[in-house]
Amino acid sequence: MTSFSTGRAPRGDEIDYWRQARREAYVSVRTDPVDTGFGGEIGLGQYTDFRLSTKRARAEEVKRSRSDIAQSHDDQEYLYFLFQLRGNLLVEQAGRAALATPGSLVIYDSATPFTLRTKEYYEQAVLELPADEAFARAGVSRSDYLLAKTFDCDGAMGSVAAFFVNLARTQASDPHGAHRLEPQAPALGASLIGLLSPPRPHADAPDAARRSQVLAYMRAHLADPDLDSQGIAVGLHLSRRTLFRLFEGTGESVMGQLRSLRLERARVMLRAQPDKPISSIALELGFSGPVQFYRAFRTTAGMTPGEYREIAALEGTPAQAASEPGS
């Protein structure tokens, strides 16, 4: 867990602090308070395949432009699922505008420009998933169909929403329980995409299930430096042709997906095990050596593993949350 609170910032520096907190917790954006007396708090849980946070703040306007996207050093493109708990927030993206109201869900994508506007104090639980992987898990081609639309959290949707909202609220006080629930979260997040997407031919369902099996197999064998598409196909009793077809339209090749999973796990290990030699992490994740690991990490993250670990070490420690920011 990492927490951010403008209450920790020097008087007069609250806005600069909040801008930096937003960049670290989510993606690079420009944000401005709507009026004086701004305050905000974020409690961020970072897991292997997703991030989950609680966010509460006074009125603000947040923008991510095309130039922000071009200049950012984000290692992936993300989907953000906003479970609105209090207050109203307007989400604008893909030529649409959706009002997030208490009890609703709105989704936006970090890969295209967006604006978030609110004129009042608000609270949210926010789920972040790597976009390509989430759509692949759901067996749905990536599109902007779900973006900037308001969905009511009822029925099956309500059950999934309740899982993430409750996990976000309790992950700091019950980290062991959160860790036990971690493996279920990415699949549940992807299920939201499936529930909200237009009906698709039933024939697509087996492919989605097979992709999930492939991803699970990859995660279980990340340490194998000799793992390749042939080994994955043999291990899952698939032909290579079928394996390659399962990832068509997902935005990533079979081996590209394997590398992404290894680098995601590397980021977790660099944060969670600050004393572990980087060379050991490289070998444990199936890289042939430190040089290969350094090159792959720098290409995706824009920095070396050592630099990433140094930045992670500078993150603040969790603090007690106030009843309302700026109060």
Image: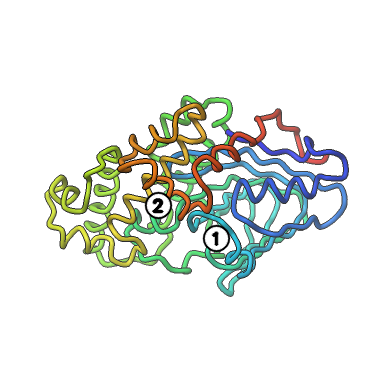
- Whole-angstrom CA distance, mark 1 to mark 2, is 17 Å
Q: Can you identify the residue that label 1 sits on?
A: 110
Task: Point out residue 199 in the picture as x, y percentages from the top left corner.
Answer: 34, 66
Residue 202 has which mark? Answer: none
- Res 283 quadrant in image: top left
Secondary element at tag 2: helix
Left/right placement of residue 260 relative to residue 209 reads right
Q: Residue at x 43, y 40 (%)?
A: 266
Instruction: Work out whether 245 lies above or below 287.
Output: below
Task: Point out residue 303 in the picture as x, y percentages from the top left corner.
Answer: 53, 49
Label 1 crowd bin: few (<14), some (14–19), many (20+), radius 10 Å: many
- The answer to whether residue 187 of the structure is visible from this angle is no
Left/right placement of residue 299 relative to residue 316 reads left
Q: Residue at x 53, y 36 (%)?
A: 166
Q: Can you identify the residue that label 2 sits on?
A: 190
Instruction: Report the front residue among 273 and 152.
Output: 273
